[in-house]
Image (cartoon, rainbow, N blue to C red):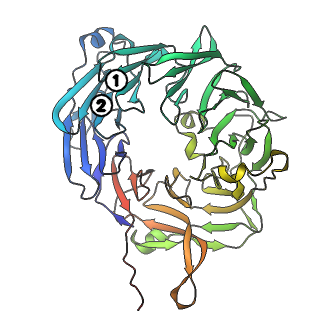
Amino acid sequence: MDFTEIYKQTGQLATFSPGAHFLLTAIQDRLVVRRADSFQITRSWQLEPSPSATALAASRKPLTRPQAVSDSGSSVDRDGWISHAGWSCDSEYILAACARKGFVDVFKMRDEEWRARIEAGAEGLVKAEWAPDGRNIICWSEWGLRVTVWNLVTGSATYIQYPAHAERGYAFRSDGHYLVLAERHKSKDSIGVYDATSAYRMVRHFPLPTGLFSALSLSPTGSHVAVWEGPLEHKIHVLSLAGEHLGTFAPEKDPGFGVRAVAWHPAGLFLAVLGWDDKVHVLENLTWGPITTFELQSRIPVGTTIWREPPDWLEATAGRGFLSYERLQAPHTLCLTVRDRTKPPPELPAASKTTCSEHLAWNVDGTTLMVRYGGAPDAIWLYAFPSFARPAEEKSVPAPHRTLKPKLRSVLLHAAAVTSVWWNPVRKGSLACATGGGAVYLWSDEWESEGEGGQTDGEAEEVAECVGVPARKFAAHGLRWAPDGRGLVLLDRETFCCAFEVEEDVPVRQ
C-alpha cells in the first residue's frame, strides 16, 4: 500500500465523496476539500461563528465556558468547531454543522461563493445529515423534541415530533423512498413511516411492542424492520412496514444487559443478533427463530485458520513495509477477559455511540460474518456461511429442506484491542482493521496462488498482513474505506492519512 502525508483533522471528520474523487475534512471551524489523486486543496470554507439571536436568547448553557488551550498557549473556543460534516449524494453540496451554536452551513462545490445557513433556533441542534436525495437536510433538536427536514430547493421545512433516538432510531429504505422513524408519544414507543418523495408525508404510524425502545434496523430489502429493547432485556421484534408483528426472539434464559449489535444479511435472508453475553443468534426470515448460535469459547477448534500478529514487529521494521501474520496450528487456547456478570459492561456507555457494524457485520455478498466479542477484544472472528445463501440460489432450495451449516473459518489475533474494523464495500473477501497503533491490518481471501509455469491454479487462499504506517507519531484509532474500495482513511486523534492500493504492471511472458 502507498501512504499519503499526515494531515490535520478534528472531530474524526474525514470522508471521501460518493464518487471517491474528493476528500472532505474538518479542521476546527474550517472545511477543506482535497483531490483524492493528488491531495491538493481545491476548496476551503470558514464558518461564521456567530449564532442567531434566537439561539443566543434561548441558550440554557452558562455564559462562560472553559476554553481549551492550544500548543501555542492561546485559548481555543471549541463551541465554534464543526461537529458534523458530509457530502450530498451527487457530491454537489457539502454541509457543516456546529451543534453547540445551533446552525448548519451549506456550501456548493461548483460555486465557492455560494452558501446557505440553517438556524436551529430555540429547540437547539444535536445532529444534522443529508437525506438520500441530496437536496434535503435532516436536523435533530435537543431533548428529542422534533426532527426538521429542510429542503434546499424550496426553502421549506417539515417537522416530525418526538423522535426516540437521534443515532439509532431511524433508517432510510435502500432506494431512499421511505424514512422509518422511531417515536415516543405519551411514554409509548411507535414507528412512523414517511414518504421522502412527497415532502415527508406520513403514510404509516403504528405502536411498537417494546417496553423501552433501544434501536432499530431496517432490512436491505426494505420490507422488515427489527427493533430491540433497552439494556435490561434481551429481546428483539421483527415487524413489517405495514405494522404487522412478524416475530419475537428472546433467549430461553435472559443473559441480561440486552442486545449489543444486530446485522442483516445483504439479501435479508438472516438476522444476526449479538448479545452482551457474547452469543450470536442467527435468525431466519420465515419464522424468525434461531437456526444456529455462535458463542465465544477459549478453545479454537481444529479446521480453523488462525492468524496472529507477530510480536514487536513494528519495532523490528521501524513501522515501514508489511509483514505477514503468523500462522498458528489449531486447536489453540485463548486467554479470555473474565467479566463480572453482576455488573453492567464497562463498555456499555461508549458502545451506545458506536455503530453495530463494527461489532457484527456481513461481507458484501453475505458469505462471511464478522464478529467482535467483548470477552476477546483483540480478536476478530470470521464465520463462513454456505454458498446457497445467495438470493439466486436460495429460491431453488425448498424452505423445509434448507440446511444451514456455518462454521468458524478464521480468527485474527492481535497484540492490542481492535478499535475499528470494516469490510470492503466492493470486494467480498477483503477486511481492514486498526488497533490504535502505528499500523493497519488487512485480511483477504482473494489471492490466487501460482502453480507450475507461473500460472494461477484458480484457487483463492487467505492472506493476512500487518502494514506499518510510515510516520513517527501516528496511531490509527479508526479507519474508513473509500466508496470504490481502493483506499482507506486512517484516523488518529487530531490527524489522518490515507492508504491506497498500489497497482503493479504484471509483465507478460513471451
Q: Which mark is residue 78?
A: 2
Q: Secondary structure at mark 1?
A: loop
Number of marks present in the image shown: 2
User: Which residue is denoted by mark 1 in the rendering?
Assistant: 100
Q: Secondary structure at mark 2?
A: helix
Q: Quadrant of residue 445?
A: bottom right
- Going by the image, does 462 lie left or right of 24? right
- Say which quadrant the C terminus sits in: bottom left
Along the polypeptide, which appears first: circle 2 or circle 1? 2
Q: Check disc 1 and give the amino acid type.
A: Arg
Pointers 2 and 1 in contact (CB under 8 A)? yes
Q: Residue at x 71, y 50 (%)?
A: 394
Is residue 390 visible in the rendered image? The answer is no
Query: Relative to residue 201, is residue 77 depicted above or below?
Result: below
* Residue with the most extreme left position: 113
Distance from disc 2 to disc 1, alpha carbons, whole Å, reads 9 Å
